Image (cartoon, grey):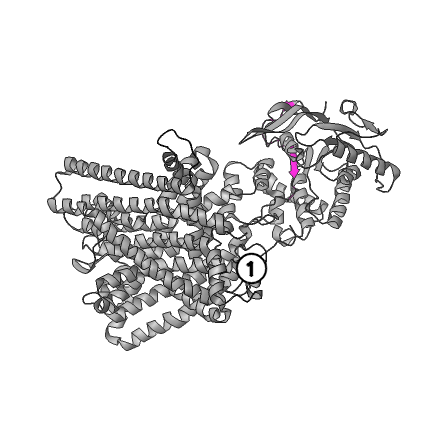
Amino acid sequence: MAGTDRTGRELGPAVGPPTRPGRSFVPVDPASFWNRRLTVQAATVALTGIPAVLLATAVAPPTAGSLFATAATDLAYSFARMLGAYLLSLAFALGYGYLAATSRTGERVLIPVLDVLQSIPILGFFPPAIIFFVNAAGPGNPLGPNLASMFLIFTSMSWNMAFGVYETLKSLPTELREASDVFGARGLFRARTVIVPATVNRLVYNSVLSWTNGWYFLVAAEFIATASSTTALPGIGTFLLSNATGAGSTTGLVIGLALLVVLIAGLDIALWRPLARWAQRFRYDQTPSGESEAGEVGAPRAAPLRRAAGVVVAGMRQGVSRLGTPFLGLASIRIGGRARPESPYRRAAVRYVALGAALVVCWLLLIALGVGVFDVFTGPIAPAVRSQIAGLPLALGASFGRVVLAYAICLAISVPLALALYRRPRTARFGLPAVEIIASVPATALFPVFLVGLLGVIGPEPTSILMIVTGMIWYLFFNVLSGLRAIPLDLVEAANSYGLPSRQFFRKLALPAILPALVTGSITAFGGGWNTLVIAENVRYGSTIVLQVPGVGELIDMGNFEGGGYPLMVAALFALVLAVVGLNELVWKPLYRRAVDRYRLE
Amino acid sequence: MALIEVQGVAKSFPSRHGSINIMSDITFDVADNDFLAIVGPSGSGKSTLLRLIQGLDRPTAGEVRFRGAPVAHASQEMAMVFQNFALFPWLTVEENVAFGLRARGWADDRIQTQVERYLSVTGLVGFEEAYPRELSGGMRQRVGLARALAVEPSVLLMDEPFSALDPLTAESLREEVLQLWRDPQLPPEAVVLVTHNIEEALVMADRMLVLSRRPGRILAGVLVNLPRPRDRKSEAFYALTDYVYELITQGSPRSPVPTVRSTSETGPLP
């Protein structure tokens, strides 16, 4: 309709109270979003990348040239892997999303599967994947680890894209579908002119997020692969790690990081920004009720991370009803015949106890079963491995403690930081781009820097926790910030007109208002944290153990690297997945529902 | 033979509490050269009825026939103009108008000629390369109209085509549609217009079908035998407006109006 064309509209100041009253969820305005990103990324290149490369080249002339060449070659390898995995993800997402959106049976099966897949820590599956692909390709064949790495990157890229395709096709306006029917669009013509174009805008948007995810997992995969000489992968992650350990050089580390940042920023400027502008025309926003679904769940507005949160939560919300049903059914079983009105607390308590007990029993049974199966098929498990498996609950506890501690640190940093940037728009003008520059570097690429700069100073345990923090913090920060920015202007004005002091403003308005976003951020942050565990608890370069702390991630790695450890790896992975899924079902989903029910501002 | 026969059509949708009855016992014909308006309050199933006629949806009971043959799938003999235009935002004006022809597998040069013709008929020359979002509402609906006319349908179905436009734009577009309708060189052979605007129906149509509140039933068939162009300020126009208004609000008219006939009596117009 006339007047709803948003292409030329500006979003207003980057940070600060929303400039428009009324509905708090302003649909994403990619035009200004990309303009701002461009500024940020250009600044990134100018401020960090180029001078860093120049400096590194100038300071260490004898080795820098060859280091630069190696880094560039390795980066090219990594990029090729990313590209391959991305193209695979694209094809997968279109097929999977289309099937889920068009077939009722498909939807009932595919969407819950997608829900589970995107909530489990996929990094844990890399060790088994590497074993699988190396065996399949034959030992010594470089194809094996390469395929394993691409598989991991694929898993980190494809879920959100598939969800994007599914959601756009599901929310394709009825009139457009009818118009295709009225004019007889069928088969290939329909796919080419209607189905694929309808998904383009969302696919481009989600691709940006997928590449952000992909870089993180690419580097992680190379770290893990490098721990064994038979599976070593040439790539930027390997390059960084090699320069952080043993005979490596700090110059190499700087060159590698700078090249990586330049590539990421360059891709953004040269590829994603023009693509997003072009994809504008694939948006159908002619109906007056054009509020997108995505706007409702996570209010993703400026950063891909926020987008990620929205997608994850959209998935979780859909998953709640489906996955939660059997558990809720279990919880509603009442003992004794007396029918009396149950208090919600009692019901919740019963549900939690039942769920917890069921999970523990299932877990023990499956572990026992797993050990039995290994005993039968591969011979008895070595006693050492057996005792490590028995120690799994303890390891899980240690890891859990580490993630919770990291989460507390993230919370303590990101909430005040977001609040400060929200309350002081002038600070935000410089502060936010700075934060976005730091956040655009894949967290894993910073790990070698920690290993060089901090490990010797603060010891393995704090370094490991710090690694987990970098894997979590941005999810929390950007969600809290977008939650703050979604507070309706009239509420802020009301608070100001009553002269609410800062502390009261936070307690009475900001905190309740950001709760849903905070929970969203926490869910995604914990997701990131669990993933990071796998590389943050055990870092090796070749056979040298660089960093090791006891935990479930460490056990997965030990199982991967040590002889006869395969059962350990599977058990540890299984324990991790179960813990994560259980935590989602028991804590996050109910919490999210409560937060949304009580504190959503509309 | 009537062009379209709607015979005892009923439609209900499943819901959480059993099923919702949208309409029942709908029977009427559309003849060649008929301009039929279907009016009724919101929820009377007007738009659903239009979709049943096109074959986008199947009736729960009864049958829709086109030239004697039951309508089973989306009929390619009819074309629809949508309330919110339903233009493909990724296609240019030209490509949107060509959409139905491409789906039918026409050759490129034939499509070119046909598209040019209907772009000029609807006053869109000069906008071929524009995208829908760059156009005003009135221009968008012209594209919707050109797209529907380009496939040269026997029946043009219009689903509240003017209600998303501002009143002035709507008024001028109504006039243009009537001019196109009067041109014997142009399709279609019949028009079915769904609207909740009684005046609009009286200005445009030869016949009116008045539906009741949900579940929609035919309250009356009204023959609009006012001289064209219709004079909204005439006594007869007022009388007819009041009559239909009372029908809809009270379910029955207080006073009979001479131009009114029951559905069964309303045959094709001379």
Residue at numbered disc 1 = A491
The percent position of residue B140, horizontal first and vertical second, equals 66, 48
How crowded pointer 1 is (Cα within 10 Å; few <14, some 14-19, many 20+) is rated as: few
Identify the residue at image location x=75%, y=30%: B251
Please, is residue A373 above or below residue B67 in the view? below
- Membership of B78 in magenta stretch: yes
Residue at 40% across, 46% down: A589
- The percent coordinates of residue A482 (x first, y second) are 47, 58
Which residue is more in the foreground, A157 or A181? A157
Residue A481 pos. (x, y %) = 46, 60
Magenta region, residue range: B69-85
Quadrant of res B225? top right
Residue A510, horizontal then vertical, whole percent: 48, 60
Q: In this image, A171 relative to A548: left or right?
A: right
Residue B186: quarter of image: top right
In the figure, A517 relative to A351: above or below? Answer: below
Q: Main secondary structure of the magenta part?
A: loop
**Residue A236 seen anywhere in this rendered image of the structure:** no
Look at 74% across and 40% down and name the residue there.
B197
Closer-to-camera residue (A51/B84): B84
The image quadrant where one finds the N terminus of chain B is top right
Q: Nearer the viewer, residue A221 or B144?
A: A221
Image quarter where the C terminus of chain B lies is top right
